[in-house]
Image (spheres, rainbow, N blue to C red):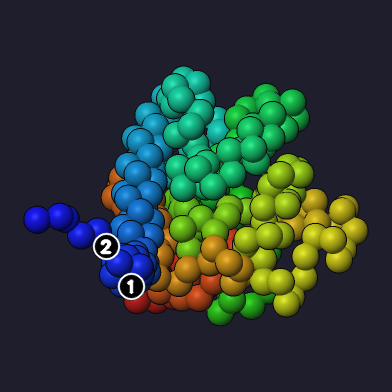
Amino acid sequence: MKRRGLTLMELLTVISILATLAALLYPVYTQVKKRVYVIRCTTQMKQLGIAFKMYAHDYGDDSPYAITYAEKLYPHYISDERVLVCPYFATLTPEAVKEMHNFRWQRWGTPWSSYKVESPKTLDGIARKYPDEQISFAEMYSVLGDRIPIAYCIVHRIGCPYGLAPSPAGRDFCARYCIDPNVITPKDIPIEIWIGAMCPTPPGFLSDLSQPWIVLRWDGSISLDYDGGWHWDTGLREFLEKVGKGK
């Protein structure tokens, strides 16, 4: 008996079924992929937590008051500068990461880090205009103790880290994917002002409220925080809310 091949209608039916399955599974794949990056980022931040402890101990202060910037951990406490950058962001735009590293090396002699560190020396020097708006690191530490947040990653939630202004590739990436196109873009303002900008204005294409802030605490634990909206510029308001709740 001669074997009959697929008719055009049957072939189109098979293709449409496969296309439908792909469309249904792609969002699941995307979420799983993002989750994997969150796990990888969490692992890196735990390494940073250990390195911060070692750094503090070596400098004679076993409290978070010894820390300043994550970049200072390289190369004596962190041997690979890739640990200083969120793996999700490094995958999205390796060009910007390279440019930021080059800029930091030329300007300050250190690599770049995408993780934001809450330096006690910086926060305790803030002049409080209204007691209900700002809180010092000392006040946070007195309530939370060793569970006080010392660093966090915003990339998974906002789409990119703070301070990409020195990198042309970083500015372009941020303008394309991380900044709300209806608000403002770097092309709309003088470069001097943009250089001083601390953070993007989400939500952009990569902003995702289903993703967490990844928070490193002084005791070495990691919190995945899904509270709040898009903005976490210095973290003071969120810290104040957490202190009030005893978190």
- Which mark, residue 36? none
* Percent of width and height locating residue 143: 36, 64
Note whether 21 is above or below 156 in the view shown. below
- Which amino acid, by three-letter code, is at mark 1? Met
Residue 163 visible in the snapshot: yes
Residues under numbered marks 1 and 2 in contact, where contact means CB atoms less than 8 Å apart: no
> Which residue is disc 1 drawn over?
9
Note whether 185 is above or below 183 in the view shown. above
Note whether 223 is above or below 238 in the view shown. above
> Which residue is disc 2 drawn over?
6
* Percent of width and height locating residue 229: 50, 76
Residue farthest to the front?
Answer: 1
* Percent of width and height locating residue 57: 38, 29
Q: Which residue is drawn at 72% across and 33% down?
A: 103
In front: 51, or 225? 225
Q: In this view, does 150 lie to the left or right of 186?
A: left
In front: 165, or 245? 165
Residue farthest to the left?
Answer: 1
